[in-house]
Image (cartoon, rainbow, N blue to C red):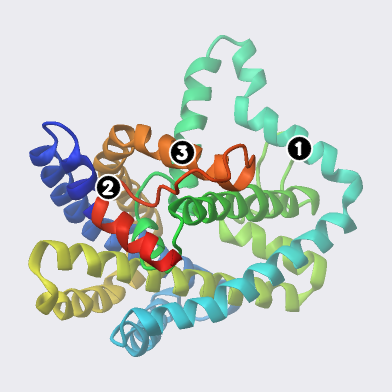
């Protein structure tokens, strides 16, 4: 919201536009924090727990929700430092373990990888249907679904992760931006591809039709694939991994929502948002999973609109700063070029002082 207010606001005739975009972004980000950051993640946790136990789903969901509330309260009410500490201890290890486990399964079924990729492309572009004359609509639908799930997975274009990156102590904005790009690459290209190949190479779906052989869907397919490869341990491991990934995502989005609330209503009122966010877990744990995802997609779309407008408006500045960094640090064509740390003179001077 601050880059919209100050960045777009710095442009000619952009002061009012920047303020409007910042308010809209903050408002939509609060709703998105309840959607993708709360409903969607708690739904993933309850679905994961239900794959491990045979108790009544409604009871499991309620108990799970209460446990999540207690854990969230301990972390969220502790502020950004506690959130960051918790996430940095959980996410890297679980991501590495998940990727390693996925690669083991893929190598166990390496002969089926070409067929799996063939099924991915055939399904994405629906080649058979395209030949029948309705491919355009189906491909458009596939792209729409892909955009929704992509944003849900890596948050690219939402402007959410900016709030975390802005809290870093990196002097060069381009360096932090490159880390942001790496996050999307790691999540989408590495983790999501590994997950798809695990499901497609273990024989839990029909590669011709894409139908689940056991009737399992979503998380159930991945759990079935890990269980088939590693036995009961595989299913338990995946469920634990999903719970931890979802929990840390909830923590991250609680921070996004808090900062947005702070921008609109002031710092002193943020405790009210945190209490509402934590209490919302009970609703999230009992709501229909499909409804939670649909609401999340809607809020994501609304949040992305003001952010993407800001990205387009400031794209020229981004290119300018990136070229400056590349000329000094990457190609080294102009190693003596004066560094461009910010578009704002006061921040530029502050960063230059750190050089001395």
Callout 2: few (<14), some (14-19), or many (20+) C-alpha neighbours within 10 Å?
A: many
Q: Which mark is residue 147?
A: 3
Q: In this orientation, which residue lies closer to the viewer: 171 or 212?
A: 171
Mark nearer the N terminus (1 vs 3): 1
Front label number (1 vs 2):
2
Q: In this figure, which residue is indicated by the disc labeled 1?
A: 117
State how far apart marks 1 and 3 are (Cα).
Answer: 19 Å
Q: Tell me: residue 166, above or below residue 200.
A: below
Residue 15 image-quadrant placement: top left
The answer to whether residue 336 is left or right of residue 113 is: left
Question: Residue 106 placed where, x, y %?
Answer: 82, 55
Please identify, in this view, whether the residue under mark 2 or under mark 3 is nearer the observer. 2
Identify the residue shown where x is 74% and y is 69%. Answer: 227
Q: CA distance from mark 2 to mark 3?
A: 14 Å
Residue 170 visible to the viewer: yes
Cα distance, mark 1 to mark 2?
Answer: 33 Å
Q: Position of residue 11 (x, y in %)?
A: 19, 35
Location of residue 325 with respect to 78 vertically, above or below: above
**Which residue is the extreme one toward the right?**
111
Q: Residue 101's quadrant in the figure?
A: bottom right
N-term-proximal mark, 2 vs 3: 3
Q: Residue at x 47, y 19 (%)?
A: 137
List the residue tagged with mark 2. 303
Q: If you read the primary sequence from the N terminus, does the residue marked by circle 1 or circle 2 appear first?
A: 1
Q: Is residue 199 left or right of residue 316?
A: right
Quarter of image, res 332: top right
Tell me if mark 3 has few (under 14), some (14-19) or many (20+) residues whose alpha carbon lies within 10 angstroms of its own.
some
Residue 133 percent location from the top left of the image:
56, 9
Secondary structure at numbered mark 2? helix
Helix, strand or loop at label 3? It is helix
Numbered circles on residues, count:
3
């Amino acid at each position: 919201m601050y880059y919209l207010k100050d960045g777009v606001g710095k442009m000619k005739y952009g002061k009012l536009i920047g303020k409007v975009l910042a308010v809209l972004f903050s408002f939509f980000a609060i709703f998105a924090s309840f959607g993708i950051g709360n409903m969607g993640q708690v739904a993933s946790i309850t679905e994961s727990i239900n794959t491990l136990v045979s108790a009544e789903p409604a009871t499991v969901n309620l108990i799970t929700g209460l446990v999540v509330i207690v854990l969230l309260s301990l972390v969220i009410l502790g502020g950004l430092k506690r959130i960051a500490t918790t996430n940095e201890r959980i996410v890297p290890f679980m991501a590495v373990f998940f990727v390693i486990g996925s690669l083991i399964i893929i190598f166990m079924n390496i002969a089926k990888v070409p067929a799996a990729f063939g099924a991915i492309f055939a399904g994405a572009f629906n080649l058979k249907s395209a030949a029948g004359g309705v491919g355009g609509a189906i491909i458009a639908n596939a792209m729409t679904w892909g955009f929704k799930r992509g944003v849900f997975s890596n948050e690219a274009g939402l402007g959410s992760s900016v709030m975390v990156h802005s809290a870093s102590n990196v002097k060069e904005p381009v360096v932090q931006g490159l880390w942001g790009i790496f996050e999307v690459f790691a999540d989408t290209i590495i983790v999501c591809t590994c997950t798809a190949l695990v499901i497609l190479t273990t024989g839990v779906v029909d590669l011709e039709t894409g139908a689940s052989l056991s009737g399992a869907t979503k998380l159930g397919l991945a759990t079935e694939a890990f269980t088939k490869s590693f036995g009961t341990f595989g299913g338990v491991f995946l469920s634990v991994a999903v719970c931890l990934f979802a929990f840390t995502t909830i923590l991250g989005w609680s921070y996004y929502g808090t900062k947005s609330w702070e921008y609109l209503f002031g710092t002193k009122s943020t405790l009210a948002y945190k209490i509402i966010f934590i209490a919302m877990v009970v609703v999230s744990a009992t709501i229909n999973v499909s409804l939670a995802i649909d609401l999340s997609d809607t809020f994501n779309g609304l949040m992305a609109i003001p952010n993407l407008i800001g990205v387009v408006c400031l794209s020229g500045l981004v290119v300018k700063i990136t070229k400056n960094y590349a000329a000094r640090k990457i190609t080294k064509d102009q190693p003596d070029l004066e560094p461009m740390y910010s578009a704002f003179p006061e921040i530029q001077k502050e960063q230059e002082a750190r050089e001395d």
